[in-house]
Amino acid sequence: MPPVTRQQVEDFLYAEAALLDAWKLDEWLTLLSDDAVYRVPSNDRPLSDPKDTLFTIADDIHRIRARITRLNDKAAHAEFPRSRTRRMISNVRILAQNELTVIVEANFIVHRFRRNESIYPFVGQYRYTLRITGDGFRIASREAIIDAIELGSLASVSFIL
């Protein structure tokens, strides 16, 4: 099997961003592996483990699916009306790969628009473990490390960052 290219990874990340920005959360779920994790670590310990450190979000696949069910529910007051987002992804780097997985890092900025509130820019770095399958990639691990010093100044992270 030929090595995975940065272009292939970028295309996948851009497609993922488009699904999230369009609030196509059920379609986004199809990009995840059956044992996927989604994490947003604390700002002061971004390289820590959620087993012994408080994380903003530390979801396994069951919690991810439950989060999507809640976000799709109009009774979910935290996201009704839904936030509008626009994601910019850059500096995509393949850190390691073998025949089964690709380890990727990329920078991001997510502009969040909600009601009459100010626009909140979430800036940081994504870390992915992508599984290579016969029909493309599946996200096994997705971390969003936010660069802000204080999360309180950004508002809630009630959407998929």
Image (cartoon, grey):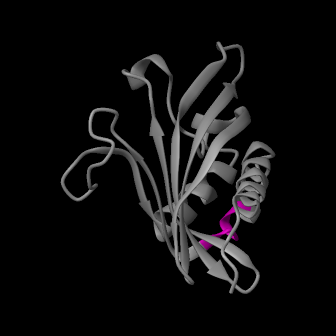
Above or below 145: residue 37: below
Q: From the image, which quarter does the C terminus lie in?
A: top right
Asked whether residue 106 is drawn in magenta, I would say no
* Residue in the picture at 58% in, 39% down: 107
- Label total for image: 0
Left or right? Give the position of 81 relative to 69: right
Res. 138 image quadrant: bottom right
Above or below 83: residue 3: below
In this view of the protein, can residue 148 be seen by the observer?
Answer: yes
In this view of the protein, can residue 81 be seen by the observer?
Answer: no
Which residue is at the front of the view, 34 or 138? Answer: 138
* Residue in the picture at 76% in, 51% down: 14
Asked whether residue 31 is drawn in magenta, I would say yes
Where residue 160 appears, x then y in whole percent? 59, 46
Res. 135 image quadrant: bottom right
Where residue 28 appears, x then y in whole percent? 71, 61
Q: Residue furthest front?
A: 2
Which residue is at the front of the view, 132 or 81? Answer: 132
Which residue is at the front of the view, 143 or 67? Answer: 143
Res. 24 image quadrant: bottom right
The residue segment tinted magenta is 28-32
Which residue is at the front of the view, 14 or 159? Answer: 14
Left or right? Give the position of 148 relative to 135: left
* Residue in the picture at 41% in, 25% down: 151
Left or right? Give the position of 155 relative to 75: left
Q: From the image, which quarter does the N terminus lie in?
A: bottom right
Where residue 48 appears, x then y in whole percent? 26, 50
Above or below 124: residue 53: below
